[in-house]
């Protein structure tokens, strides 16, 4: 059994909580800019003093509305400044914020609101308020839920007016009651295999982890002028970690509602570090490649991309890039790579990527561009990161070493076990699930991995997703799927083959990328349905499958695939709000397609042998 521990570096007063750090910022650096809000085309700065004043006013409103210490406050909104203000205000009222994805259905909202016993809710607009009202009518409803305030309909101003007569002493006394052991939030898992479970995270989980991360990644978070733009959904644990780590670091944070808007906002906000998921970096790469088109421009892009990757790989060799490669890199930088940096705002030096494997190709590409992507690993139950590569000790293709205060084990069956300051205290009102996941303080992640001699962790798959073919071969689908999804035409991929004679795949097409891709390849326009059956499209998807197959043994390779004429989306419930495929649902709903796929393959083989 492999085990590795990174010792803690920082001791924290157990009486501290997240709220203390905003108070410190406002008292010690009242004019320091903590947030920048986009108003029209302008980023408007908000100081620490302004933030504390606004947060306190909203907290007073919650108190006046009857929110008691420990009560749950639901937040259902896209990523925006008000989300963070309400989050902080709930903590100031000694309440427990419970995020609900703005894409959630009424059924999903009903489960979260009722299971967590929410007392009040803040939503973004009247549309989401209507979702909450529908949730009240489902099954047993949401019996504890009272007021619902809409941000876009003046809800926060209503709260501030409501709390005008609440004395400062009430908020101060509530804040003083909080400590590292206090419950900070309940975040519900994505629910890929059943009802979402409520993960209870404490103020200590956030504070201790964020302080250690700030220390270990000081070159990223601490420099003068450091700033970041948040576009991940704040209902996701990674975004909440970003929210808290930037507050504790005292650096400006901008908010933008989604990835599409972020592409434009990166250029005007000009962050120095970006925290995101791999799909974003794939989209950026594919979009740039598509804009380059075919012909000479396309060839220049591909040459520049190959040069960027080669240059980065050479940085890891004892001699470094050769003079010839350095010269090529300078040309590529002038032609293509510098333009990519400019599109990201021109100041971004570092990115932290988590949530899924990034892949060595993209890691090297972006480092060659000048953006060092520090790949990490973590789960909701670990307050996001347990591991991360750091600038002075990068191994591209791994998720790095454990953060300080973290221990990791690889069990005999390959499962990753984690113990440390970030590990949750348990699942809300679910002792059986807690006992199964936490044994002697070790959290069973459900992920499979390996460690090298230096302690660097590599993720190899998901334990519950392992496919066992009819021939008895164990196949981890995730690495294959990740490689195939890197193709610009591919939206989603699900590898199949459990108890089947060979490994296959279901592939869906990216409707946004399809028109440009067809134009680049001098093909006529096709609908998604037409493209799914088009031989030329299939030929190029086969190239993506071939690249994925080159990474695994022959027995693990995908021997055939089918292209679906529908995509897996949050709206049709095949994706979770955090963009994970609900594999069990796909396998159930497309069982007939999978059966036909293997029957056709068997008939083809029989015909060839006759």
Image (cartoon, rainbow, N blue to C red):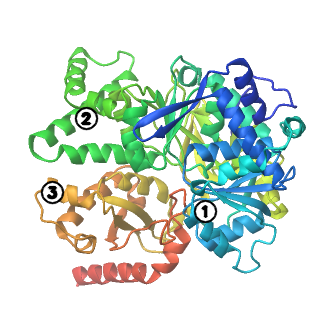
Q: Is residue 172 above or below residue 106?
A: above
Distance from disc 2 to disc 1, alpha carbons, whole Å, reads 36 Å
Of the residues under marks 2 and 3, which one precedes in the sequence?
Answer: 2
Whole-percent x and y of residue 383? 68, 44
Q: Quadrant of the N terminus?
A: top right
Q: Is residue 492 above or below residue 185?
A: below
Front label number (1 vs 3): 3
Q: Secondary structure at mark 3?
A: helix
Q: Can you identify the residue that label 3 sits on? A: 519
Label ID, residue 522 = none
Q: Can you identify the residue that label 1 sits on? A: 464
Q: Name the residue nearer the viewer: 304 or 340.
A: 340
Q: Name the residue nearer the viewer: 79 or 179.
A: 79
Mark 2 vs 1: CB contact within 8 A:
no
> In the image, 59: left or right of 293?
right
Of the residues under marks 2 and 1, which one precedes in the sequence?
Answer: 2
Whole-percent x and y of residue 315? 37, 22
Q: Secondary structure at mark 2?
A: helix
> In the image, 472: left or right of 419?
left
Q: Is residue 493 above or below residue 350?
A: below
Whole-percent x and y of residue 183? 81, 47
Whole-percent x and y of residue 201? 76, 47
Distance from disc 2 to disc 3, alpha carbons, whole Å, reads 23 Å
> In the image, 264: left or right of 517?
right
Q: Residues within 10 Å of mark 1 (few under 14, many from 20)?
A: few
Residue located 66% across and 50% down the image: 156
Q: Secondary structure at mark 1?
A: helix
Q: Quadrant of the C terminus?
A: bottom left
Of the residues under marks 1 and 3, which one precedes in the sequence?
Answer: 1
Q: Can you identify the residue that label 2 sits on? A: 306
């Amino acid at each position: 059994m492999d085990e590795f521990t990174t010792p803690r570096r920082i001791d924290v007063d157990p009486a501290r909580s997240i709220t203390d750090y905003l108070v410190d910022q406002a008292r010690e650096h009242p004019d320091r800019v903590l947030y920048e809000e986009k108003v029209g085309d302008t980023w408007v700065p908000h100081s620490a003093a302004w933030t504390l004043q606004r947060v306190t006013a909203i907290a007073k409103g919650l108190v006046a509305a009857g929110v008691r210490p420990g009560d749950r406050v639901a937040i259902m909104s896209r990523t925006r400044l008000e989300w963070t203000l309400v989050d902080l205000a709930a903590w100031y009222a000694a309440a427990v914020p419970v995020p609900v994805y703005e894409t959630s259905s009424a059924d999903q909202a009903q489960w979260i609101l009722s299971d967590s016993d929410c007392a009040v809710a803040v939503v973004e607009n009247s549309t989401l308020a209507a979702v909450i009202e529908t949730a009240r009518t489902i099954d047993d409803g949401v019996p504890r839920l009272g007021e619902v305030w809409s941000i876009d309909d003046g809800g926060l101003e209503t709260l501030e007016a409501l709390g005008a007569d609440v004395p400062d002493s009430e908020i101060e006394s509530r804040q003083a009651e909080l400590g590292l052991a206090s419950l900070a939030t309940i975040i519900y898992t994505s629910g890929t295999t059943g009802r979402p479970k409520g993960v209870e995270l404490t103020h200590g989980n956030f504070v201790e982890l964020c302080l250690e991360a700030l220390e270990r990644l000081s070159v990223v978070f601490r420099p003068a002028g450091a700033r970041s733009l948040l576009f991940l959904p704040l209902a996701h644990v990674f975004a909440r970690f970003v929210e808290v780590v930037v507050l504790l670091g005292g650096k400006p944070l901008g908010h933008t509602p989604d990835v599409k808007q972020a592409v434009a906002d990166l250029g005007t906000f000009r962050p120095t570090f970006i925290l995101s998921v791999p799909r974003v970096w794939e989209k950026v790469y594919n979009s740039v490649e598509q804009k380059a088109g075919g012909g000479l421009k396309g060839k220049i892009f591909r040459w520049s991309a190959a040069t960027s990757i080669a240059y980065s790989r050479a940085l890891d060799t004892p001699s470094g890039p050769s003079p010839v490669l350095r010269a090529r890199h300078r040309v590529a930088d002038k032609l293509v790579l510098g333009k990519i940096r400019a599109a990201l705002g021109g100041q971004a030096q570092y990115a932290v990527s988590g949530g899924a494997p990034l892949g060595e190709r993209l890691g090297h590409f972006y480092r060659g561009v000048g953006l060092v992507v520090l790949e990490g690993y973590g789960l909701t139950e670990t307050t996001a990161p347990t591991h991360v590569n750091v600038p002075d000790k990068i191994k591209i293709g791994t998720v790095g070493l454990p953060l300080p205060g973290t221990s990791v084990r690889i069990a005999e069956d390959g499962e990753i076990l984690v113990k440390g300051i970030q590990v949750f205290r348990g699942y809300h009102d679910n002792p059986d699930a807690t006992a199964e996941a936490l044994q002697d303080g070790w959290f069973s992640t459900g992920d499979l991995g390996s460690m090298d001699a230096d302690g660097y962790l590599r993720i190899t798959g998901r334990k519950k997703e392992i496919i066992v073919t009819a021939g008895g071969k164990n196949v981890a689908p995730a690495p294959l799927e990740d490689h195939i999804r890197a193709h610009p035409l591919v939206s989603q991929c699900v590898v199949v083959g459990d108890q089947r004679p060979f490994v296959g795949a279901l592939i869906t097409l990216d409707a946004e990328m399809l028109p440009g891709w067809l134009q680049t390849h001098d093909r006529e326009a096709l609908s998604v349905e037409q493209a799914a059956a088009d031989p030329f499209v299939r030929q190029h998807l086969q190239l993506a499958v071939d690249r994925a197959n080159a990474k695994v043994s022959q027995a693990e390779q995908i021997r055939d695939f089918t292209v679906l004429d529908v995509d897996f989306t949050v709206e049709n419930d095949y994706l979770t709000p955090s963009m994970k495929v609900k594999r069990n649902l796909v396998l159930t709903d497309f069982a007939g397609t999978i059966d036909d796929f293997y029957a056709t393959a068997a008939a083809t083989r029989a015909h060839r042998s006759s």
